[in-house]
Amino acid sequence: MKKCILILFMIFSLISNLNASYDKLAYEFSFRGIDGKLINLENYKNKVIVIVNVASRCGYTPQYKDLQQLWINYKEKDLVVIGVPTNNFKQEPGTNTDIKKFCESNYGINFPLTEKTNVIGSNAHPFYKWAKKNYGIGAIPKWNFHKIIVNKNGKISDTFASFTKPTSKKFINLIEKEVKN
C-alpha cells in the first residue's frame, strides 16, 4: 500500500511539474556577473540554459571540468552553461575575484559565472524562487552543483542532483533532446 501511495505521489509530482502554469519565463531574470556585468537570460532566448550553483571547496568541484566540456561541446548547438557561485553550503568563502581566478586557473572556465549569490531560503535569487514556485521542490538546491535545465521555451525541463555528473548518460541524453527541439 505504501509503495502504491509513493508511486502515485511521484506520478502526480511529475505531472504537476510538466503542467506547471508559469506566470513568468526564465528569460525575465538576470544575474549580476562575476565581473560586474549583467547576465540577462533574455539574451539566451531559444537556447537551452544549464544553471548550476557552484563552489570551489566542495567534493563535487571537479564537475567544473565536465561543465566546461559541456559548454565547449554544445555552445554551437544553442546551449549556455551558467555557474552560480554560492556560499549557502559554506563551501565558497572567497570573493568574486578569488572565485573567478580559481575557476579560470584550475578549470579553464570561460562560461558565464555570476557573482556569489544566495540560491536557497528567503534571500534566494529571484530565479531560484521562481524555479521552486514553478517546478517544485526538485528545483531547490540541496547542495552545490545542483543543475537546473531550462528549455528553449524558457521553462524548466528537469533538474539534477549534485551527484549527477554533467557527463552522465541521463544528463547528456536530456541535453541532446533539448538542443534538438
Image: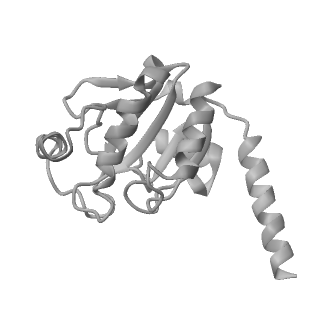
Q: Quadrant of residue 7?
A: bottom right
| Of residues 87 and 153, the one drawn nearer to the viewer in this rendering | 153
Which residue lies most toward the bottom here? 1
Residue 152 seen anywhere in this rendered image of the structure? no
Q: Residue at x 57, y 28 (%)?
A: 179
Q: Quadrant of the C terminus?
A: top right
Q: Residue at x 49, y 53 (%)?
A: 168
Give the image location of residue 136, x and y in percent: 63, 52
Residue 124 seen anywhere in this rendered image of the structure? yes
| Of residues 153 and 176, the one drawn nearer to the viewer in this rendering | 176
Give the image location of residue 1, x and y in percent: 88, 82
For the rendered model, the colour scheme is: one colour
| Of residues 155 and 64, the one drawn nearer to the viewer in this rendering | 64
Give the image location of residue 53, x and y in percent: 37, 49
In this view, 132 is above or below 104: below
Give the image location of residue 117, x and y in percent: 31, 45
Q: Quadrant of residue 24?
A: top right
Q: Residue at x 63, y 34 (%)?
A: 177
In this view, 74 is above or below 18: above
Q: Tell me: 79 left or right of 108.
A: right
In this view, 8 is above or below 39: below
Q: How many marks?
A: 0
Q: Quadrant of residue 23?
A: top right
